[in-house]
Image (tube, grey):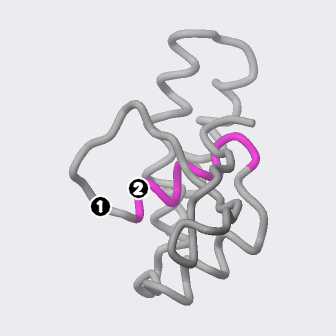
């Protein structure tokens, strides 16, 4: 679901195929990697193995958990404008959390 899937790739001199996870992102940009990781949490996130693997390859700097809320506020406000509903109360909660930092 979402922007993740699986692809078959050739290994061992193209004699065998292996299934590997992939991430699709039609809205790519050059920016802070923390913003990308934060966005993965907006609609449920990925499994814990994804985050553990990311941390193993390129650990996030200290404080990234707090900054996640700041990065994701934009997306929640955008969804409030586009879809209304519950996003307003979620945005208010995020703003309150940011103000307590």
Q: Position of residue 76 (x, y in %)?
A: 56, 32
The residues colored magenta run 34-44
Q: Nearer the viewer, residue 14 or 53?
A: 14
Q: Dot 1 surroundings within 10 Å: few (below 14), some, or many (20 or more)?
A: few
Q: Nearer the viewer, residue 44 or 11?
A: 11
Mark number for residue 78?
none
* Among the 4 quarters of the image, the one containing residue 85: top right
In the rendered image, which residue does mark 1 sit on? 32
Q: Identify the secondary structure beneath mark 1.
A: loop
Q: Residue at x 56, y 63 (%)?
A: 10
Taking the magenta stretch, the answer to whether it contains residue 35 is yes
Q: Nearer the viewer, residue 64 or 27?
A: 27
* Among the 4 quarters of the image, the one containing residue 27: top left
Tell me the CA gap for discs 1 and 2.
6 Å
* Among the 4 quarters of the image, the one containing residue 4: top right
On screen, residue 80 above or below 25: above
Q: Residue at x 78, y 63 (%)?
A: 47
Which residue is farthest left?
A: 30
Taking the magenta stretch, the answer to whether it contains residue 85 is no
Relative to 60, is 28 on the left or the right? left
Q: Residue at x 67, y 68 (%)?
A: 16
Q: Dot 2 surroundings within 10 Å: few (below 14), some, or many (20 or more)?
A: some
On screen, residue 5 above or below 50: above
Q: Are marks 1 and 2 in contact (CB under 8 Å)?
A: yes
Q: Quadrant location of the N terminus?
A: top right
Q: Position of residue 97 (x, y in %)?
A: 59, 57
Q: Position of residue 18 (x, y in %)?
A: 68, 65
In the rendered image, which residue does mark 2 sit on? 35
On screen, residue 44 above or below 33: above
Q: Residue at x 55, y 49 (%)?
A: 23
């Amino acid at each position: 679901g979402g922007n993740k899937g699986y692809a078959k790739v050739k290994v061992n001199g193209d004699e065998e195929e292996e299934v590997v996870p992939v991430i699709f992102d039609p809205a790519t940009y050059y920016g802070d990697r923390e913003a990308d990781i934060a966005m993965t949490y907006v609609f449920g996130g990925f499994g814990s193995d994804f985050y553990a693997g990311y941390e193993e390859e390129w650990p996030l700097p200290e404080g990234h958990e707090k900054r996640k809320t700041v990065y994701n506020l934009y997306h929640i406000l955008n969804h409030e404008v586009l879809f209304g509903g519950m996003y307003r109360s979620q945005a208010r909660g995020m703003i309150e959390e940011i103000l307590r930092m």
